[in-house]
Structure formats: C-alpha cells, structure tokens
Amino acid sequence: MSMELVQVEKLGDVFFKSGYFRDIKDQAQAIVKILYGSELGFSPVVSLLGIHVIEGKPTLSSNLLGTLVKRSGRYDYRVKEATALVCTLEFFSVGKRERSLGLATFTIEDAQRALLVKPGSGWAKYPKAMLFARALSAGVRLHCPDVSACPLYVPEELGATVDEEGAVTELPKS
C-alpha cells in the first residue's frame, strides 16, 4: 500500500480529530503510526489500532505480530501449549517442505522473575494471553526476525498495560 504524504497527512488529521484513538496526541503521532504500519503492509486503521509507540519504540499487538509471521509466506507457528502457567509455540519454515525451526516458551515463572505479575495488571487478569504474546515475540525475534527490518516488541514488553485482546489500556509512565 503506497500513499502520498499529502494523503497520509489528511488521514492523520482526520484520525486525530476523530478522538477515537486515545493514545494519539496529535496529527504527527497518527502519521508516524500510519507510515510505520504501511511499511509492514497494514492499512491506516489497523496501524492505529495495533501499533503503539512506547518510549520511542514502535510495538505491535500480538495479533499484528502473528499476522506478519503467517502472511510472510516463509514462516508459520503453531500453539503447542497455552495455559495460565505456560505458553509454548513451535515455529516453522514453510515452502516445498515444512521444517521446524524450534520452540519459544514463556512461563508464569518467567513473568514473576521479571516482576511483571502485579495485582490488577494484565498478567494477573489475563495470564494466558500475556504468555502467548511474550512467547510469540520471543519466537519471532529468535526464529523469523526477517519478517520486519527492525526489532519487534509487543506493548507489554515495554511496560504497557494491555487487556485480554492485547489492546493497550495504559502506557507506562515516563
């Protein structure tokens, strides 16, 4: 999807003025999200909903990150185990012959060791979803980093609070 800068500026202004995207403070922030998403092949609305800039680093919701893997045509992943205690994903290269690239696992013990599980946090409310997001982002960085030209993070890795669907509900305090 290629848009002229004038189109992106108009969209950024419309999206900002709509008030529907709480984390956008001005037109420039909307434009940055739209342009970043465009580079990854996402539409403007999908970009505004699933990309969050935290401490200057763009992050993708786990569903956008999973979309990058699955639509790459080179990689896939399958859930091997997903509970409130552990999530293990297996990553594959696809093509003429599918082959396993390896596993990515994140456990509630990993989250506790990193001091992520706090009362009222997404980790306390939705551990299964949080474990999936962390296993996915770790697996992408380890097994298929070329789905993007830059490091990919999910918002909760940079301190954002997210809900069960991975939508950011609160940004970290700077």
Image (spheres, rainbow, N blue to C red):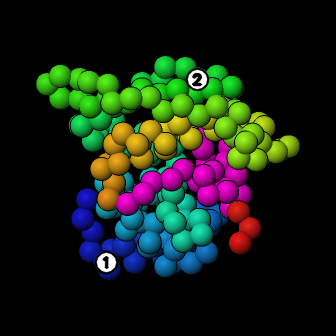
Residue found 32% across the figure and 59% down from its top:
149
Q: Is 154 covered by the magenta stretch?
A: yes
Residue appearing at x 60%, y 69% in the figure: 55
* Residue 98 lies in quadrant: top left
Which residue type does callout 1 highlight?
Answer: Leu
User: Is residue 120 part of the magenta span, yes or no?
Assistant: no
- The residue lying furthest to the top in this view is 80
- Report the Cα–Cα distance between label 1 and label 2: 42 Å
Residue found 51% across the figure and 57% down from its top? 59
Q: Residue at x 49, y 79 (%)?
A: 28
Callout 2 secondary element: strand
Residue 75 higher or lower than 34, as above or below: above
> x, y (%) of residue 86?
63, 26
> Dot 1 lies on which element?
helix
Dot 1: few (<14), some (14–19), or many (≥20) neighbours within 10 Å?
Answer: few
Q: Quadrant of residue 118?
A: top right
Q: Name the image quarter holding the N terminus.
A: bottom left
- Image disc number at residue 82: 2
Q: Which residue is mark 1?
A: 5
Foreground disc of the pair 1, 2: 2
In the depicted view, which residue is nearer to us: 111 or 159? 111
Q: For the residue marked with disc 2, what is the amino acid?
A: Ala
Left or right: 55 as drawn, with respect to 59:
right
The part of the chain drawn in magenta is: 150-171
Residue 107 visible to an observer of this rendering: yes
**Other-residue count near label 2 (Cα within 10 Å), few / some / many at <14 / 14–19 / ≥20:** some
Residue 64 coordinates in the image, percent (x, y): 44, 46
Residue lying at the far right in this picture: please name it.
Answer: 119
Of the numbered discs 1 and 2, the one sitting upstream in the chain is 1
Q: x%, y% of residue 47?
A: 44, 57
